[in-house]
Image: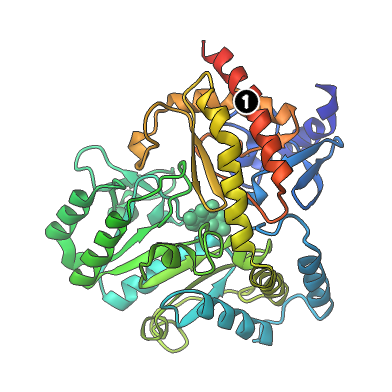
């Protein structure tokens, strides 16, 4: 398509100097084929490509943009902060204000430390959990993503199911050997792990609302079991709220589910579109970090004043404008608009939703709750559906396994437009599947 020639030319240039042409793999469209559009600018719910095409954006930079692109109050806060200096390497008031806001928002949180990405937040929380418990084993769940730290790029091994194996080249077996990988939605597997080596487990790490491999909504009873078993064994429960934090509620999944973890990690929204992550918990745990405690953790740009300003502005608008209520309503509207479309769809399709997070499960039956329950054929249906939507000017994530994000910038008309376009896109996907 000639309309995309600028993006194609940029991709060509990019591939010469950036591996795969992108700085994060999923952006390369590998899972759906075709050439990624390069973005010139974005405003509200719209992204404008370098070819002048406008897309209604349901990715929102993978989660941070809960207020939409370039929200005027966030832009102004960033502009003002940058004018006062972009980084000091010394403490500043914005960090304190931001920490107070996060502590006030999240159940059980007494202290928080800021870092520069979700990966760093989780990596640091795990180090703290190991330092605080004096134990070395970490349990995670198949289908959850926690960033790209070595010991978390681990998949379920084949033989003894729970023993991890590296899911990336470059991760030594020795690192993976301290990570156990369990299935979601399976209390018995967790009970068995604790029975076998409960006294070695430093932390159980989970996305309480798993949103990196489809949207695998967990039964509350499963999460309650994790809380009970970790507490009984002296292990820490770590909620990775990098996606769910400040999205599914002010107090994240912990508030929504009524389960308080020992440590929680944040990213995305907390930085208002700037590079920020955070991790926090009870004072007695957090004070084991340097400079008070023996667990080392640091960062040149941690608590960066411009990023703190973006995060603070975002949190202020979220609260003032009661955005969580708006998004809940918008999500319900999406569900209502999609119901007749999905019921009449020529391929099996269901909407899975939690607040402003949504995912299309393209397989028969109840939506999956564990990674292994996802039918890999659904990804084959997704690629033509994705491209059919893109041709209509609607951007979903370029992977069947990624969720969609609603923002405060989406209108009722926008979700209705998505529903109408999906009816046509599902028909196109069905054609390909035949
Ligand atoms: N945890 C979760 C739940 C995530 O979704 C992500 C990123 N999508 C990360 C951690 C890693 O965050 P980052 O990409 O900022 O390093």
> x, y percentage for residue 47?
77, 44
Report the residue that reaches farthest toward the right.
52
Binning the other alpha carbons within 10 Å of mark 1 as few (below 14), some (14 to 19) or many (20 upward) gives: some
Q: Nearer the viewer, residue 137 or 250?
A: 250
> x, y percentage for residue 163?
24, 48
| The quarter of the displayed image where residue 200 is located | bottom left
Instruction: Give the answer, above or below, for where 249 lies relative to 88.
Output: above
Q: Nearer the viewer, residue 116 or 243?
A: 243
Does 258 sit left or right of 250 as displayed?
Answer: left
- For mark 1, give the secondary structure: helix
Instruction: Give the answer, above or below, for where 160 lies relative to 108.
Output: above
Q: Which residue is mark 1?
A: 423
> x, y percentage for residue 235?
25, 69
Question: Could one spot residue 312 in this view of the protein?
Answer: yes
Residue at screen point 66% across, 53% down: 407
State which quarter of the image contains the N terminus.
Answer: top right
Does 239 sit left or right of 99 as displayed?
Answer: left
> x, y percentage for residue 86?
76, 75
Report the residue that reaches farthest toward the left.
195
Q: Nearer the viewer, residue 152 or 381?
A: 381
| The quarter of the displayed image where residue 50 is located | top right
């Amino acid at each position: 398509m000639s309309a995309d020639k600028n993006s194609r030319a940029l991709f060509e240039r990019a591939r010469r100097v950036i591996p795969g042409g992108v700085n994060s793999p999923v952006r390369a469209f590998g899972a759906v084929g075709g050439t990624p559009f390069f973005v010139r600018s974005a405003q509200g719910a719209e992204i404008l490509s370098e070819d002048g095409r406008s897309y209604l954006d349901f990715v929102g930079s993978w989660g941070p943009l809960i207020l939409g692109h370039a929200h005027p109050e966030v832009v102004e806060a960033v502009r003002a902060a940058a004018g006062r200096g972009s980084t000091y390497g010394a403490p500043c008031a914005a960090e304190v204000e931001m920490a107070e806001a996060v502590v006030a928002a999240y159940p059980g949180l007494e202290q928080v430390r800021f870092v520069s990405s979700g990966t760093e937040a989780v990596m640091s929380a795990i180090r703290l959990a190991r330092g605080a418990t004096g134990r070395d084993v970490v349990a995670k769940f198949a289908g959850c993503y926690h960033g790209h730290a070595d010991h978390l790029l681990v998949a379920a091994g084949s033989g003894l199911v729970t023993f991890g194996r590296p899911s990336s080249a470059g991760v030594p077996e020795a690192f993976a050997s301290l990570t156990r990988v369990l299935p979601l939605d399976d209390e018995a597997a967790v009970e068995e792990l604790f029975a076998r080596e409960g006294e070695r487990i430093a932390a159980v790490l989970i996305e309480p609302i798993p949103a990196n491999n489809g949207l695998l909504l967990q039964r509350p009873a499963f999460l309650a079991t994790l809380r009970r078993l970790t507490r009984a064994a002296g292990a820490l429960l770590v909620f990775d709220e990098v996606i769910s934090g400040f999205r599914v509620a002010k107090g994240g999944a912990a508030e929504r589910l009524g389960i308080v973890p020992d440590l929680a990690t944040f990213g995305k929204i907390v930085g208002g579109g700037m590079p920020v992550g955070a991790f926090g918990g009870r004072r007695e745990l957090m004070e084991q970090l340097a400079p008070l405690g023996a667990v080392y953790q640091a960062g040149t740009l941690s608590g960066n004043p411009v990023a703190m300003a973006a995060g603070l502005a975002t949190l202020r608008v979220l609260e003032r404008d009661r955005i969580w209520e708006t998004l809940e309503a918008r999500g319900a509207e999406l569900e209502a608009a999609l119901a007749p479309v999905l019921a009449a769809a020529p391929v099996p399709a269901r909407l899975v939703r939690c607040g402003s997070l949504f995912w299309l499960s393209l397989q028969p039956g109840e939506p999956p709750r564990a990674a292994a329950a996802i039918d890999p054929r659904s990804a084959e249906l997704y690629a033509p559906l994705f491209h059919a939507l893109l041709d209509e000017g609607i951007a979903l994530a370029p992977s069947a396994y990624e969720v969609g994000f609603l923002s405060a910038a989406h209108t009722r008309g926008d979700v209705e437009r998505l529903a109408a376009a999906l009816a046509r896109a599902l028909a196109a996907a069905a054609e390909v599947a035949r």
